[in-house]
């Protein structure tokens, strides 16, 4: 036997967003004035009442194992939340609470995929989807949402990508990295294809509350029994409640899938942190003003960043409607020169901006769009202004 490592593990790419964030933090620690547009992380502190619930959990000795799939009280609260906010009936035994949305997604794909099953992933996509699918033995099938279609895919495109091996579709609305939102009508058309072709929809709605246009997030599982039976809805608390470090995500699924996920989790990680579950309960069942207030601040930042990107030479974007990202098209920079160096893709821009302007942003090759970069507006307007001033200075310095 050789000491060869797992082929699956060797095929995994490290997360480039986390790597860029780490690089920006390194520069900050070295005293540099870095503007970080890279991290998908709210700059707000976790609301006080949520922290207090965690402190109370420690003080009352709630520090032991819980049920592997989460505490009954948190599942009951999530069941109520799903019904009231998402219009979906998930009984507590259809809900599994995990260590963040990423972990929920990992569990979901492990539960539904057999080796070689295909998963349709619309690009631009959050960079972890293909890696998580591959780790679970699946084969990502990428389809493209073009800029002219607001980076969204149509039901026809999905139908055309289906084969005998299609097991699931990943939907992410509001989207990371584009900030785009699928309408109810678009979701209905997609649901029809899922039912006809008989595949699962993994609906990642982690940005459900970060929604800046009229109306509210539509959950595809709420659109009828047949699509409900084929959908796994994944949500997490990180983005809406400024709880990135607490690591709580959850999914609602048909009973048989929830049971599989629960068994998988019982062997791999057991319960998510007991204290974080108490904090999550306070988040879900407490006053939601904090979510609205943070949402208002994000909206102000969104409008400011959108305006600045529109005003900046050689870059453009579509107005984002949700999440906290602006997805920037840099094609007009291609072929221009910076200090004699030719710009070929977004990675070149990201490299120059961090090295010479102390601005961190995410080039989107790993999101399926090498000619775009992603900028998070989960930082203050003052910082956005400083960062955009620097990007503008860079753009104006480009030559033919
Ligand atoms: N889904 C999307 C689209 C995301 O952007 C993220 C985080 O960046 C996650 C899921 C996972 O979030 P977490 O594991 O922090 O709950």
Image: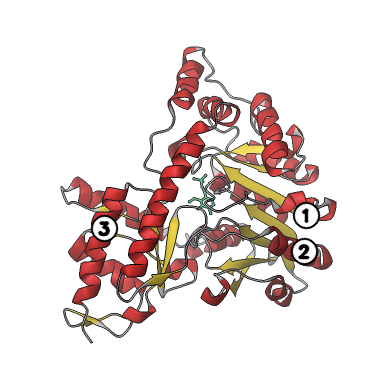
Q: Position of residue 313 (x, y in %)?
A: 30, 74
Q: Nearer the viewer, residue 313 or 269?
A: 313
Residue 241, placed above or below residue 151: above
Q: Position of residue 8 (x, y in %)?
A: 55, 61
Picture mark count: 3
Name the image quarter holding residue 307.
bottom left
Between discs 3 and 1, the one toward the N terminus? 1
The answer to the question of whether label 2 and label 1 lie on touching residues, with beta carbons closer than 8 A, is yes
Callout 3: 10 Å neighbours few (<14), some, many (20+)?
A: many
Q: Which residue is mark 2?
A: 194
Could you give the CA–CA distance between mark 2 and mark 1, rounded to whole angstroms? 8 Å
Residue 127, placed above or below residue 300: below
| Quadrant, the C terminus | bottom left
Q: Which residue is mark 1?
A: 230
Given this view, does label 3 or label 2 mark the residue nearer the observer?
Answer: 3
Residue 95, placed above or below residue 187: above
Q: Secondary structure at mark 1?
A: loop
Colour treatment of the image = secondary structure
Q: Secondary structure at mark 2?
A: helix
The answer to the question of whether label 3 and label 2 lie on touching residues, with beta carbons closer than 8 A, is no
Residue 38, placed above or below residue 118: above
Q: Nearer the viewer, residue 37 or 265?
A: 37
Could you give the CA–CA distance between mark 3 and mark 2, rounded to whole angstroms? 42 Å
Q: Position of residue 61 (x, y in %)?
A: 51, 14
Q: Which residue is mark 3?
A: 387
Q: Visible in this render: residue 114?
A: no
Q: Position of residue 297 (x, y in %)?
A: 41, 44
* Residue shown at the point (73%, 65%) measured from the top left: 190
Callout 1: 10 Å neighbours few (<14), some, many (20+)?
A: many
Q: Is mark 2 within 8 Å of ligand 1?
A: no
């Amino acid at each position: 036997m050789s000491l060869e490592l797992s082929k699956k593990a060797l095929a995994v790419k490290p997360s480039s967003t986390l790597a860029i964030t780490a690089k920006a933090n390194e520069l900050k620690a070295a005293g540099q004035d870095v503007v970080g547009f890279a991290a998908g992380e709210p700059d707000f502190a976790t609301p006080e009442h949520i922290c207090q619930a965690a402190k109370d959990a420690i003080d009352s000795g709630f520090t032991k194992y819980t049920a592997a799939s989460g505490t009954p009280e948190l599942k009951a609260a999530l069941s109520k939340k799903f019904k009231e906010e998402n219009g979906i009936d998930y009984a507590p035994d259809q809900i599994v609470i995990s260590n963040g949305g990423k972990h929920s997604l990992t569990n979901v794909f492990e539960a539904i995929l057999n080796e070689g099953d295909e998963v349709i992933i619309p690009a631009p996509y959050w960079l972890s989807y293909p890696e998580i699918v591959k780790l679970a033995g699946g084969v990502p099938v990428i389809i493209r949402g073009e800029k002219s279609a607001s980076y969204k895919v149509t039901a026809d495109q999905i139908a055309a990508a289906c084969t005998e091996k299609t097991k699931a579709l990943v939907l992410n609305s509001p989207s990371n990295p584009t900030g785009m939102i699928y309408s109810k009508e678009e979701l209905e058309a997609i649901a029809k294809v899922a039912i006809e072709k008989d595949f699962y929809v993994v609906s990642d709605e982690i940005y459900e509350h970060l929604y800046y246009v009229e109306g509210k997030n539509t959950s595809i599982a709420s659109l009828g029994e047949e699509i409900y039976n084929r959908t796994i809805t994944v949500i997490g608390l990180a983005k809406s409640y400024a709880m990135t470090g607490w690591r709580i995500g959850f999914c609602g699924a048909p009973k048989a899938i929830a049971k599989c996920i629960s068994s998988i989790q019982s062997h791999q990680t057991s319960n998510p942190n007991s204290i974080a579950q108490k904090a999550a309960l306070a988040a879900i069942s407490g006053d939601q003003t904090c979510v609205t207030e943070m949402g208002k601040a994000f909206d102000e930042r969104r409008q400011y960043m959108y305006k600045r990107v529109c005003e900046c030479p050689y870059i453009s974007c579509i107005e984002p409607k949700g999440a906290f990202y602006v997805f920037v098209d840099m094609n007009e920079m291609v072929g221009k020169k910076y200090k004699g160096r030719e710009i070929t893709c977004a990675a070149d821009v990201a490299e120059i901006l961090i090295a010479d302007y102390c601005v961190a942003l995410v080039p989107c090759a790993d999101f399926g769009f090498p000619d775009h970069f992603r900028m998070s507006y989960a930082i203050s307007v003052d910082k956005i202004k400083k960062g955009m001033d620097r990007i503008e200075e860079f753009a104006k310095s480009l030559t033919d």
